[in-house]
Image (spheres, rainbow, N blue to C red):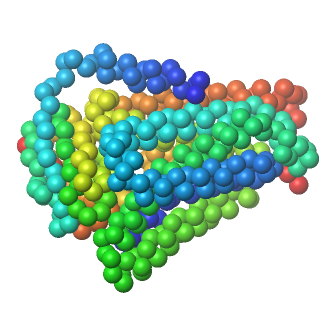
Amino acid sequence: MRFQLPLVALALAIPLTSGPARAAELTVRLSVKDAGFEPAELKVPPDARVRIEVTNDSASAIEFESFELNRERVVQPGQTAAVYVSGLAAGRYDFFDDFHQTRHGALVVE
Amino acid sequence: MIETLLITWRESLEAALIVGILLTYLGRSGQRRGIRYVWAGSAAAALAAIACAAASDGLLAGLGPDAQEVAQAGILFLAVGVLTWMVLWMHRNARNLRGELHERADRALATGRLLGLATIAFAAVFREGLETVLFLWGVVVHRADASALSLMGAGLAGAALAVATAWIFFSGFRFLSLRTFFQVTGVLLLLVAGGLLTSAVNKLIGLGYLPPLVPQVWNTSWLLRDSSPLGAVLSALVGYRSRPSLLEVLAFAGYLPSMLWLLHRADRAATPAANGGTPARSAA
């Protein structure tokens, strides 16, 4: 652990120095049903700090995953998990449920 | 069916590779007790993953989804620290591992370091194991019919395939001389630790605790997709991501060169007669 401390300290110091000037937070809600994501497409403006609230309304555990967004998150049935993305350029960012790969959706930044 | 197999293969691969490299490393340096501790850590993690999945409606739900993720990030940071410490310690004491390799077996690792090994194995297996168990659990609950059993079988076959992949990967290492082997695995373990550090930072970014700084520094998905088999292997071994954020790149770039430098120093310290140029013998 000894070798790791300076780096961890640095990582923790970054948000402290850049924190207050942060852009306003935008929350979008995403429900995972047995049939798929609802809505299948989320729209957000560019460069915003977005809180994606993923609620698992299906019968089994899901993994919200996106290579484009560089995020993955397991959500148990009945639970809601917040996944943050920020500063995204305009474009389409696909996501899927890694545990049920027929479920697809996209975050559209425009 | 194939999809289920591929999912568990990918989920189990990282754990299998990390445990595989530890076992290979310890086996080659004659640390039999260390090997037992790695197995014990892996077994404990597998049981803990099953217990957590079974208790997911009670215990884990009470903890809240964010706390679970923070706990996972904490386990990862711990694994990075312990892994780094182990590698540097092993290399600093490499003198004992070179010449009379087998005679000195079972002697070098103190209890604290053995527990360290068990911790790394636990962290690797628990993290991926929990996801695999949750996934398979879902398969069974979701399809309470005859197909559940065959899907479960496919899932377990995927996990077995991950172990086989790791075994094939590391059996190639047998052909290296002991000295080369030791250096290659030392660097590889630090790469693994760098990848785990990146994963931990990625989790904290996803939780909104750390800013990505720049969400996507580069995009190499045209060259190697994260979902491809090679992408999965590299993701497990060196934390490959096709679209990393700046903070993840900084964490990796801050960690790896400094630790490689410490590794180099540890190697030098371990060979006091280095100026005299006594080359290390390989194990006969």
Tell me the quarter of the image containing the N terminus of chain A.
top right
Is residue B203 among the parts visible in the rendering?
A: no
Q: Residue at x 92, y 47 (%)?
A: B103
Q: Quadrant of the C terminus of chain A?
A: top left
> Height in image: B110 above or below A105?
above
Q: Image point 64% across, 32% down: which residue?
A: B85
Question: x and y percent of residue A29 in the render?
Answer: 13, 47
Question: Which residue is rendered at x = 39% and y = 60% of the image?
Answer: B134
- Confirm whether residue B276 shows in the render: yes
Q: Is residue B75 left or right of residue B184?
A: left
Q: Nearer the viewer, residue A35 or B241?
A: A35
Estimate the x, y position of residue B55 in percent, counting from the top left.
41, 54
- Whether residue B142 is situated above or below residue B20 in the rendered picture: below
The front one of B163 and A30 is: A30
As rendered, which of A81 and B102 lies closer to the eye? A81
Q: Position of residue B203 (x, y in %)?
A: 36, 39
The total number of labels drawn is: 0
Q: Residue at the spot x=35%, y=35% of the render?
A: B204
Res B154 → quadrant:
bottom left
Image check: A32 left or right of B199? left
